[in-house]
């Protein structure tokens, strides 16, 4: 087979080989090395069952959830450059994002709509796994991790909801805080839980910084680790669920 | 290879119902394996994954160019909106806690639902119908889960679109203005 000369120039050199640890993947050996020669091996097998790439089976829902998480991480980091979690600054920073920062409103829109999308797609992904019986042995534990990831997604979205510090944010979190305060016995557990979440008795500066830290550090970190375990378990449990072989 | 030599290397056995037909050149060999139902991750899977990412990003970008994220007036603790609503994905909870003591609808039921969801695979242990959408062997499981989905989504729809001032029920076209 005659090789493309440009491709040869790009891939047949010391730099390419120092990075990729294999030749350009145009034969079965180097194609398998794309996986086995990389960190990727821990989450992706060299070969996958044909059912795995059947669009009508997974509908790509889990992957879409993950992609939204990636987009949210990137846009979130960029937003952190423009947002100060203080009562004096937070709302004005929202206005600045809309009117002063170049493409700031698009950045915020991507983050906001991406977050709504992630909640929806994680839920749809759970429905797909249920309706295809994908949670059955040996995938029971991975289903459980998935449920926890759904809950974390909800909390990620909730903690982000307060940050714009507008009426929508303030009163939504006030409702949720009241809810937390109802855990019985209310005077002991409920009140203390609410105090822990808000850092006080009202939604104020302490609540804002607590929600911010949870939103940008703690929850994304936990989510990233669990997503890693979730993917690794797919591989260890034998790939995506599929019909029994005839 | 003449006939005699071939018989020495591949002797005819009366117990065999098959024989060597021919040698062919292929890209890889597989010994004692059934029909292969796999494809290489590279490129078959990875290109589809890349394509999906592009699709997701383009779709999200189009939505973000068309619609602006909501931003109301600055938070004002002395001005309570009526009704004050939680984010849409918690409106099912808010709907439930308007019926009973908030603890039951807002904390107890969601916690129990989450625990039941995690435990589902340990109760439903039959291996029938795995990998098939709406497998007929799983009618009961699918029915129960569908009830859960309809309730979860239904309560959110009620909370989002049918609840107005003082958490009263209104049809969307009769909904009083919030201010």
Image (cartoon, coloured by chain):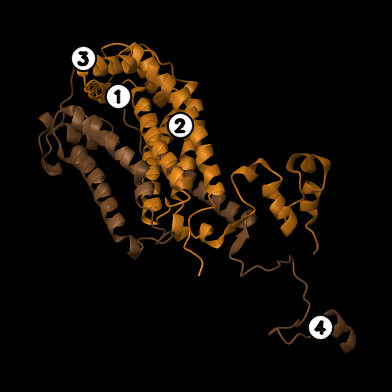
Q: Nearer the viewer, residue A164 or B6?
A: B6
Q: Residue furthest front?
A: B15
**Marks 4/2: CA distance?**
73 Å
**Where is residue B17 shown, x and y percent of the image?**
68, 85
**Marks 3/1: CA distance?**
26 Å
Picture quadrant of residue A183? top left
The chain whose colour is orange is: A
Q: Which mark is residue A187?
A: 3
**Where is residue A210 shown, x and y percent of the image?**
39, 17
Residue B150 relative to residue B11: left or right = left
- Residue under label 1: A169
**Where is residue A189 shown, x and y percent of the image?**
26, 18
**Marks 1/4: CA distance?**
82 Å
Check the rendered structure and report the hue given to chain B: brown
* Quadrant where the image shows the C terminus of chain B: top left
Q: Of tags 1 and 4, which is closer to the observer?
A: 4
Q: Nearer the viewer, residue A88 or A187?
A: A187
Q: Which mark is residue A54?
A: none
- Residue under label 2: A107
For residue A246, above or below residue A154: below
Q: Secondary structure under badge 4?
A: loop
**Marks 2/3: CA distance?**
42 Å
Residue shown at 73%/66% (left/top)?
B29
Q: Decide which of tag 3 and tag 1 comes sooner along the chain.
A: 1
Tag 4 and tag 2, C-beta contact below 8 Å: no
Q: Secondary structure under badge 2?
A: helix
- Residue under label 4: B11
């Amino acid at each position: 087979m005659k090789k493309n000369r440009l491709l040869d120039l790009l891939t047949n050199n010391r730099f390419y080989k120092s990075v990729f640890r294999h030749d350009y993947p145009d034969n079965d050996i180097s194609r398998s090395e794309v996986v086995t020669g990389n960190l990727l091996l821990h989450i992706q097998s060299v070969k996958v069952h044909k059912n795995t790439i059947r669009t009508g089976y997974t509908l790509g829902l889990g992957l879409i959830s993950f992609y939204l998480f990636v987009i949210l991480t990137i846009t979130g980091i960029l937003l952190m450059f423009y947002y100060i979690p203080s009562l004096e600054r937070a709302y004005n920073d929202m206005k600045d994002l809309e009117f002063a920062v170049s493409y700031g409103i698009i950045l915020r829109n991507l983050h906001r709509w991406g977050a709504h999308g992630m909640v929806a797609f994680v839920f749809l992904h759970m429905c797909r796994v249920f309706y295809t019986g994908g949670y059955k042995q040996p995938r029971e534990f991975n289903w459980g991790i998935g449920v926890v990831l759904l809950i974390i997604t909800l909390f990620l979205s909730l903690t982000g909801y307060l940050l714009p510090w507008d009426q929508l944010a303030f009163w939504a979190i006030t409702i949720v805080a009241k809810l937390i305060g109802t855990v019985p016995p209310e005077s002991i557990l409920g009140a203390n839980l609410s105090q822990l979440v808000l850092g006080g008795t009202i939604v104020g500066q302490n609540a804002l910084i607590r929600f911010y830290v949870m939103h940008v550090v703690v929850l994304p970190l936990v989510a990233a680790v669990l997503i890693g375990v979730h993917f690794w378990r797919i591989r260890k449990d034998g790939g995506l669920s599929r019909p029994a072989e005839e | 290879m003449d006939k005699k030599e071939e018989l020495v290397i591949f002797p005819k056995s009366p117990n065999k119902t098959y024989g060597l037909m021919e040698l062919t050149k292929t890209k890889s060999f597989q010994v004692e394996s059934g029909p292969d139902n796999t494809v290489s991750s590279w490129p078959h899977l990875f290109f589809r994954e890349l394509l999906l990412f592009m699709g997701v990003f383009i779709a999200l970008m189009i939505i973000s160019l068309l619609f602006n994220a909501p931003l109301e007036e600055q938070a004002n603790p002395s001005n309570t909106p009526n009704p004050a609503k939680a984010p849409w994905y918690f409106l099912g909870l808010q709907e439930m806690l308007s019926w009973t003591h908030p603890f039951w609808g807002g904390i107890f039921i969601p916690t129990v639902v989450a625990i039941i969801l995690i435990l589902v695979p340990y109760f439903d242990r039959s291996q029938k119908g795995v990998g098939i959408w709406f497998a007929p062997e799983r009618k009961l499981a699918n029915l129960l889960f569908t009830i859960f989905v309809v309730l979860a989504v239904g309560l959110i729809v009620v909370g989002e679109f049918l609840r107005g001032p003082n958490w009263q029920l209104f049809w969307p076209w009769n909904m009083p203005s919030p201010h």
